[in-house]
Image: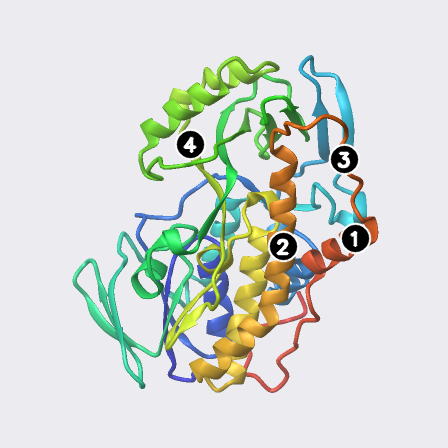
């Protein structure tokens, strides 16, 4: 063991993934999560390109694939349910609109937790309340009253990161609203959904509704989005969020009324703005940020999980390669990740713009396909991964 002590805020995807790599590099890791336990369910998330290689190096490829939703593809439909377009999970070598690695966020979190729980300390139902740092370390006060000293503090606590606000400043400084709101929740499968996602988009209103399989034939995941120039609903006020969803989705056709009828019974309702986090730097002294807390690309990019998993690999590797010097390690992590992040954020902004309600007549201008394909390649594959030869690694890398 290196004797380096690291505390990570957040036990969704980025936090446990970072714990995996930090532990393999020789650090002693504590993960603190304000929720009382792992949060099940959630939206389906994908792995593409370089993310698949990171999963292979984690040795978790088979485990994650076994927990996948087994979605065969997606149909876009009109208001009457007639199929307009078909996308297969086999498109683009499994890296297309529907990835061949698609898994519920909660199921992926469970895989990562099970992988790390024996060698990592998890503190559920607690959070970091205070951080003070000096040249040699950081003193952390937990909300539960415990006080400890760590060498590094990492915020992997999502779009609304409390650690980011504590160390870097208020959320309004960094969050960029993309003009839309997304909601999803599971409902009984009374729609005949099998292995295919169905998506309906009302071009005139900019709203969408969809249903996707979750690996359980008795239930499916409902997805809805609507345009909103402003968004000021508390992300923890569930009742206000449900009322907003009912109001904004009223009068929409297809299966929307039937989906909304299950809103009050939803055990896993989620609604939030579609937003990105844009920061000039992701570290301050011995405190660093990872995942959505640092560089949310929004669900519109389809790459939030990829950024979290790849970022965890790079952050742990660069810190260990720098002999745990935070200034050097954080700088190298950012140098590798920023082009990857910026490409995915651009994809997210472009996708969000396609949902905007246009007030102009005529078709939109044709995109520069060569530039677009180059952007997609950078967003999916990123720069070449380092093997971190010579850096301690206690785990397998053969997958």
Residue 67's label in the rendered image is none
Q: Is residue 361 left or right of residue 366?
A: left
Residue 220 placement: quadrant: top right
Q: Is residue 394 above or below residue 78?
A: below
The answer to the question of whether label 2 and label 1 lie on touching residues, with beta carbons closer than 8 A, is no
State the residue at coordinates (69%, 68%): 383
The answer to the question of whether label 2 and label 4 lie on touching residues, with beta carbons closer than 8 A, is no
Q: Earlier in the sequence, mark 2 or mark 4?
A: 4
State which mark lies toward you, 2 or 4: 2
Q: Is residue 86 left or right of residue 50?
A: right
State which mark lies toward you, 2 or 3: 2
State the residue at coordinates (66%, 63%): 56
Rendering coords of residue 153 (x, y %): 36, 70
CA–CA distance in space, label 2 to label 1: 13 Å
Rendering coords of residue 375 (x, y %): 73, 56
Residue bearing the label numbered 1: 373
Near mark 3 (Cα within 10 A), the count class, few <14, some 14-19 or many ≥20, is: some
The secondary element bearing badge 1 is classed as helix
Q: Is residue 318 above or below residue 278?
A: below
The answer to the question of whether label 2 and label 3 lie on touching residues, with beta carbons closer than 8 A, is no
Residue bearing the label numbered 3: 87
CA–CA distance in space, label 2 to label 3: 21 Å
Q: Earlier in the sequence, mark 2 or mark 1?
A: 2
Residue bearing the label numbered 4: 269
CA–CA distance in space, label 1 to label 3: 18 Å
Residue bearing the label numbered 2: 344
Q: How is the image coloured?
A: rainbow
The answer to the question of whether label 1 and label 4 lie on touching residues, with beta carbons closer than 8 A, is no
Q: Earlier in the sequence, mark 3 or mark 4?
A: 3
CA–CA distance in space, label 2 to label 4: 26 Å
CA–CA distance in space, label 1 to label 4: 35 Å
């Amino acid at each position: 063991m290196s004797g380096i002590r690291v505390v990570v805020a957040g036990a969704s995807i980025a936090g446990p993934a970072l714990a995996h790599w930090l532990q393999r590099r020789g650090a002693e890791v504590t993960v603190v999560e304000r929720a009382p336990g792992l949060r099940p369910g959630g939206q389906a998330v994908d792995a593409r390109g370089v993310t698949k290689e990171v999963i292979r190096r984690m040795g978790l490829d088979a485990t994650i694939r076994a927990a996948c939703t087994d979605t065969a593809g997606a149909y876009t439909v009109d208001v009457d349910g007639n199929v307009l377009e078909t996308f297969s999970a086999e498109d683009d070598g499994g890296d297309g609109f529907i990835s061949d690695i698609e898994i519920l966020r909660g199921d992926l979190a469970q895989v990562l937790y099970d992988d790390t729980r024996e060698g990592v300390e998890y503190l559920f139902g607690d959070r970091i309340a205070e951080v003070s740092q000096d040249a040699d370390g950081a003193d952390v006060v937990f909300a539960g009253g415990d006080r400890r000293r760590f060498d590094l503090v990492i915020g992997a606590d999502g779009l609304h990161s409390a650690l980011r606000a504590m160390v870097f400043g208020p959320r309004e400084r960094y969050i960029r609203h993309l003009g839309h709101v997304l909601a999803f929740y599971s409902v009984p499968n009374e729609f005949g959904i099998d292995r295919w996602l169905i998506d309906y988009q009302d071009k005139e209103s900019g709203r969408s509704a969809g249903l996707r399989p979750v690996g359980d034939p008795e239930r499916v995941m409902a997805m809805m989005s609507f345009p909103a120039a402003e968004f000021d609903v508390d992300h923890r006020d569930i009742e206000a969020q449900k009322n907003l969803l009912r109001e904004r989705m009223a009068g929409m056709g297809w299966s929307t009324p039937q989906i909304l009828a299950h809103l009050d019974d939803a055990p896993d309702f989620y609604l939030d703005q579609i937003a990105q986090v844009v920061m000039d730097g992701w570290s301050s002294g011995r405190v660093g940020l990872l995942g959505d807390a640092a560089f949310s690309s929004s669900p519109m990019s389809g790459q939030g999980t990829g950024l979290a998993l790849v970022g965890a690999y790079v952050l742990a590797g660069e810190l260990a390669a720098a002999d745990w010097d935070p200034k050097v390690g954080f700088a190298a992590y950012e140098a590798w990740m920023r082009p990857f992040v910026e490409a995915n954020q651009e994809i997210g902004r472009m996708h969000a713009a396609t949902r905007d309600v246009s007030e102009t007549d005529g078709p939109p201008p044709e995109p520069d396909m060569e530039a677009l394909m180059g952007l997609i390649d950078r967003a999916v594959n990123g720069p070449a991964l380092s093997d971190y030869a010579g850096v301690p690694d206690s785990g397998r890398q053969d997958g």
